[in-house]
Image (cartoon, coloured by chain):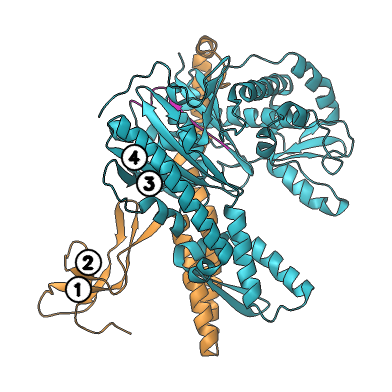
Amino acid sequence: MSDWTLCIDFGTAFSKAAVAPAGAWSRFDPAAVRPLMLSAEGQNAFLLDSAVFVDEDRVLFGRAALNEADAQADQRRAALRSFKTLLSVSDLDRALNTNAPATIDPHRVFQMRDLIVLYLAYLLASIERAIGADPMLAQGGAFSRRYAAPAWRGGDSAGMHDVIVRLFGEAEAFRAAVGKRILSPDGLSLRTISDALPKAMAQAEALEMGLIYEATAAAAYTSVGLEGSGSHMIVVDMGAGTTDIAALARLGPRTIELPEARVTLKQAGDFIDRIIANRVLDTAKWAKRPEEKSELWSVLMRQMADIKEAIMADGRATLRNQGRSISLSLKEVEKDQDFRDFQKSLRQAYDHALAVVRDDARARGRSEVQAIAVGGGAAAPFIQELIRRKMESSRPRVIPRPATPDWAHAREFRGNLAPVFPQLAIAIGGALAPDSMLAARTGFSRPANDRSGTPAERD
Amino acid sequence: MSAGEKKSKSSKSGAAKKSAARQRAAHGVSLTDALAEAAWSEADLALAQALADFDEVESAKRKDARKDALERLGQALSRAARKRGLSRIGEIDERATFDAAHHDLNEAVAKTPKSVRIQARGVARGGEVLVKPRVAPAGKKKRS
């Protein structure tokens, strides 16, 4: 029996982790939620850069890896990032056994698997340091571990989960072998790695670890404390590369995904960035030559996060470039044909998923479906409008939930959790979720839509 | 304390660990302080931008340049506010029934108005109101 539940959100740009007391789901106390301070550098201690850089004679991790990659960018060198993309491919074993490209590993000694294991060891060491520095967690106790991942489209969550847990096991063995040296800003020498890594891989520890889908983690932080009313949920997750819509149903003690509701659209945040940049380029008549357009594009992409946020939140963004002011309104973005096509596809996908989850709720005599938007695009007006639309039939009612749950504004946090909540949401939700919400555990996994042994219940 | 270690393992050295934990806690940063710093790190950038934009507003020679700078100033302040989790209350020009607990009357009046119009939106963080909406009696012209 564990005292705490740790959830790792192995993100594309940053990794995050949070801890909650075991049983937090049924005895919820916001003050006991502990996001972990993984990073010793930078102002945001909760975000650990997901990056590995293979240098001349050493390997660097996190922020140090990115800094060195920037310093050597003119030598066609790069840090390995986007592990998450790699881990979600259908043929994971093959991807892991691929040699890292020369831009990432000039020595040509590492496979992708090696670099991922090294990064996971760094992440585990950062977690251990953060737990030690937290006055509540450092008091001791046993931890159960899980990680969050998007639902794998191949459907073989059991097979992929076992591979990933094995990677964590190898990382744990490597971390134990090299100790705190892995946290040094100077990184680890290639010699240390070549000595310790093969042994660690051969003696990987058998870890107990769970998998929670990101949509389920979102459901957990949204519906914690909602009692029976959180039985059915539709989640719209607009990230950078994809927009995923998932429907979940809490049946008895378990939460299942309704797979027939799942839709993934290839248009998401990056797609909107390009629409915004193209609209600005169209209006900037003074940028005529290709090099002027190219430079303006670069400027726009560097500032895109702020520009997009201002357009979505304030309805308009103004920026300066070479002494000129450029403005773009949300209305202009909404006139774009590609944007309109995306909105139409999104609405159709949402309607389809909503119909599935409402049918399921109706069949089980439930009266409500919670709707929630998560990810970088959660606050966008067209996403908020989507989850707030009035339905033709009144039952089951669709109740839109805020992207940041009310409990994140609890007095204990003195207003400081809510602003950073979206960045930490999946790790926190994953830590709060009961075991019954897990998609897989080491040595045990169930299909996402497995309803065996789950009697229908009414409100 | 490794997250994966067994309970029995951790309890063996419990006393020593508690002492070390107290030391770390004494020197460490509290969770709320670290959360605040994380939130402020992005808000700081937006505030710095706002200060520079404010100078441009003040030094603008032309009307359109001043308008542009003012727009960027508002944008930077809105961004800083969002990064700190602040949100607006009400809409400019919105009519409401006057409630002294929820509104700040923006002008001296002989008689308490029944109906008011929002001249400046209020600001809240979560459920806490930091600035009440500033209002004027309805029917009167907006202050320019």
Label number found at residue A328: none
Q: Give me the residue at 48% from left, 47% from top.
A: A349
| Circles 2 and 3 on the same subunit | no
Q: Nearer the viewer, mark 1 or mark 3?
A: 1
Looking at the picture, which amino acid does disc 1 mark? Val
| Circles 1 and 3 on the same subunit | no
Mark 4 and mark 1: Cα distance apart in space: 38 Å
Quadrant in the picture for the N terminus of chain A: top left
Q: Residues within 10 Å of mark 3 (few under 14, many from 20)?
A: some
Task: Find the magenta span and give its range.
Answer: A16-26
> In the drawing, does residue A283 fall left or right of residue A433?
right
Mark 3 and mark 4: Cα distance apart in space: 31 Å
Mark 2 and mark 1: Cα distance apart in space: 9 Å
The chain letter for the residue carrying disc 1 is B
Q: Secondary structure at mark 1?
A: strand
Provide residue A98's location: percent of width, then percent of height.
81, 32
Q: Nearer the viewer, mark 4 or mark 2?
A: 4
Looking at the picture, which amino acid does disc 2 mark? His
Q: Secondary structure at mark 3?
A: loop
Question: Mark 3 or 4 closer to N-term?
Answer: 4
* Chain ID, orange in image: B
Farthest-out residue, bottom = B62
| Circles 3 and 4 on the same subunit | yes
| Circles 2 and 1 on the same subunit | yes
Provide residue A288's location: percent of width, then percent of height.
74, 79
Q: Would you name the residue on which mark 1 appears?
A: B116
Q: Would you name the residue on which mark 2 appears?
A: B103
Label number found at residue A369: 4
